[in-house]
Image (cartoon, rainbow, N blue to C red):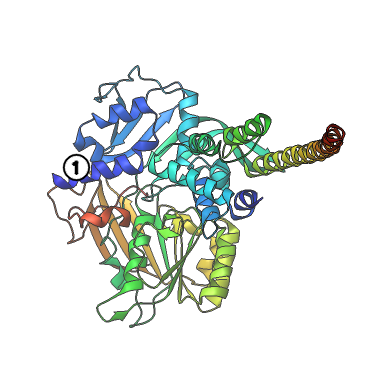
């Protein structure tokens, strides 16, 4: 219970203080169990504030209750603009580049998604005006969710296999990648840790805030964030001489060709990609060459069944199944089940009060 | 000028920018920057509000005209509220306005200098005339 209260206070310090007074006041009266399970707060211009928690959603009422139908506490466009301005530390220009990409990362690793009317110059989005929706996604880090999988990715005591993590959106590719990076960086068992460079283009892996990664990526990890994957990999190669480069959401043919160059340079790669299976990914532009060259020696495929049971399957480069792990789904760390011996904790910034043991289910991609 | 650098080239949020501007210096402007930072941090008020509050505190220390105070006050209204380019051109415009005010003040001072000098000479002559 104490943890829940301290977690609520941390949310208040890191997120709620930036929200419009009415919403903040209302949220402070909301049931602590809901607040600590919050995944998202969505604010839309002219609509009531919506909370997303435990896989469901509800609308915030003035008295703090969460209703199944829209409440009459509507958010104005001015309140939205003011909220974003506060999230930007009263310095719109300092977050301008992030806002152009559609999101900013704040202390604690939480992501604020922003949409409105983009301002375009020379074909590029340079700013966002008339903000219409803000999505506050609470960051959750699942320490231990990759501890079993990582055993199949190592090649001796100092090397790993090139690995591709495949899953549809929202099943926890980034969360798994993050924990694998942490394990490989710190080392475990007979595996001595390796130097890892992380290209965090969208700030989702490390969630850097003012240079400090808000998530634990291990002691041998260097992070370059907010930069295109190709450029980021080139800089890391030149400046940090990593043994492994980790990157999230490879998509474009440019990403793939840059990965090929890195692999040819003798650097190991761990990447993620949207997809349902190896065959679907292979069909995508640019990936065919990677598969033809047998660039990846390990595949991790995440899927989910109707009972929210997550399946993490590890395959070798020829498609032979090496391991299948089942993890129960989106349950909050305070739930009593203790899955896989894992520890589910909030980002490093939350951990001053100690770790929260609980379910190691893969969270929703934050 | 330094604030413009912080915004344009360092891309630091204003809170940090004021903290950096106040470090290691002991002139009047760094004292002002420090006060803005302190008020923003400790009282948890916006940078705009901290700017205005600091101006009020420094009003009796800086020998400025009303128009100059109005200009300074106007800066607080715009700081941080636009994109980098706009912030930069706004600060440049403000610098030009202050330069114009400085030039006008210089001319005014030179004019008054001459006036007082003439008054001094005339006064001296008057004293001499009275004495003889």
Mark yes or no: residue B56 visible: yes
Kindly identify which chain the residue marked by label 1 belongs to: A
Q: Quadrant of residue B60?
A: top right
- Residue A57 in percent (x, y) is at 30, 31
Disc tally is 1
Q: Is residue B59 left or right of residue A148?
A: right
* Residue sticking out furthest to the top: A72
| Residue at image coords 55%, 41% | A92
| Residue at image coords 84%, 32% | B130
- Residue A219 in percent (x, y) is at 36, 71
Mark yes or no: residue A331 visible: no
Q: Between A366 and A163, which is closer to the camera in this rendering?
A: A366
Q: Between A31 and A307, which is closer to the camera in this rendering?
A: A31
Q: Between B11 and B94, which is closer to the camera in this rendering?
A: B94
- Residue B120 in percent (x, y) is at 82, 38
Q: Is residue B27 left or right of residue A330?
A: right
Q: Between A186 and A179, which is closer to the camera in this rendering?
A: A186
Q: Is residue A249 left or right of residue A185?
A: right
The N terminus of chain A sits in image quarter: top left
- Residue B116 in percent (x, y) is at 80, 37
Pointer 1 residue = A5
- Label 1, secondary structure: give it: helix
Image: A94 above or below B126:
below
Q: Quadrant of residue A255?
A: bottom right
Q: Quadrant of residue A119?
A: top right
* Residue sticking out furthest to the front: B132
Label 1 crowd (10 A; few <14 / some 14-19 / many >=20) = some
Q: Is residue A164 left or right of residue A126?
A: left
């Amino acid at each position: 219970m104490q943890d829940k209260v301290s977690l609520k206070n941390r949310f208040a310090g890191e997120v709620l203080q930036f929200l419009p007074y009415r919403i903040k006041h209302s949220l402070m009266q909301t049931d602590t169990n809901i607040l600590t399970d919050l995944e998202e707060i969505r604010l839309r211009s002219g609509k009531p504030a919506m909370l997303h928690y435990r896989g469901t959603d509800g609308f915030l009422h003035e008295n703090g209750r969460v209703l199944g139908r829209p409440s009459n506490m509507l958010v104005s466009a001015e309140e939205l603009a003011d909220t974003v301005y506060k999230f930007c530390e009263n310095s719109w220009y300092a977050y301008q580049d992030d806002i152009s990409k559609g999101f900013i990362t704040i202390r604690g690793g939480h992501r604020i998604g922003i949409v409105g009317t983009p301002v375009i110059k020379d074909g590029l989005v340079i700013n966002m005006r008339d903000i219409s929706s803000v999505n506050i996604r609470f960051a959750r880090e699942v320490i231990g969710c990759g501890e079993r999988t990582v055993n199949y990715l190592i090649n001796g005591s100092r090397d790993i296999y090139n690995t591709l993590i495949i899953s549809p959106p929202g099943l926890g590719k980034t969360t798994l990648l993050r924990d694998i990076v942490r394990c490989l960086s710190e080392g475990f068992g007979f595996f001595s840790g390796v130097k890892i460079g992380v290209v965090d283009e969208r700030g989702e892996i490390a969630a850097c805030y003012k240079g400090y990664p808000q998530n634990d990526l291990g002691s041998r990890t260097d992070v370059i964030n907010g930069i295109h994957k190709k450029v980021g990999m080139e800089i890391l190669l030149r400046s940090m001489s990593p043994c492994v480069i980790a990157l999230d959401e490879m998509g474009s043919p440019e990403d793939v060709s840059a990965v090929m160059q890195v692999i040819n340079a003798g650097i190991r790669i761990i990447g993620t990609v949207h997809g349902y299976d190896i065959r679907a990914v292979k069909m995508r532009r640019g990936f065919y060459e990677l598969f033809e060259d047998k660039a990846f020696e390990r595949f991790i495929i995440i899927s989910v069944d109707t009972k929210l049971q997550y399946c993490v399957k590890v395959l070798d480069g020829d498609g032979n199944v090496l391991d299948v792990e089942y993890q129960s789904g989106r349950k909050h760390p305070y739930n009593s089940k203790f899955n896989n011996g894992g520890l589910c904790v909030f980002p490093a910034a939350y951990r001053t009060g100690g770790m929260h043991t609980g379910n190691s289910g893969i969270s929703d991609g934050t | 000028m330094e604030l413009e650098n912080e915004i344009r080239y360092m891309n630091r949020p204003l809170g940090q920018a004021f903290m950096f501007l106040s470090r290691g210096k002991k002139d009047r402007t760094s004292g002002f920057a420090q006060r803005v930072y302190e008020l923003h941090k400790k009282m948890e008020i916006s940078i705009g509000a901290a700017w205005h509050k600091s101006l009020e505190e420094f009003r009796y220390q800086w020998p400025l005209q009303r128009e100059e105070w109005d200009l300074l006050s106007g800066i607080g209204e715009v700081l941080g509220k636009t994109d980098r380019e706009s912030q930069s051109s706004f600060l440049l415009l403000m610098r030009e306005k202050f330069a114009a005010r400085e030039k006008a003040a210089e001319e005014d001072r030179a004019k008054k200098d001459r006036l007082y000098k003439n008054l001094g000479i005339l006064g001296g002559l008057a004293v001499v005339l009275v004495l003889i």
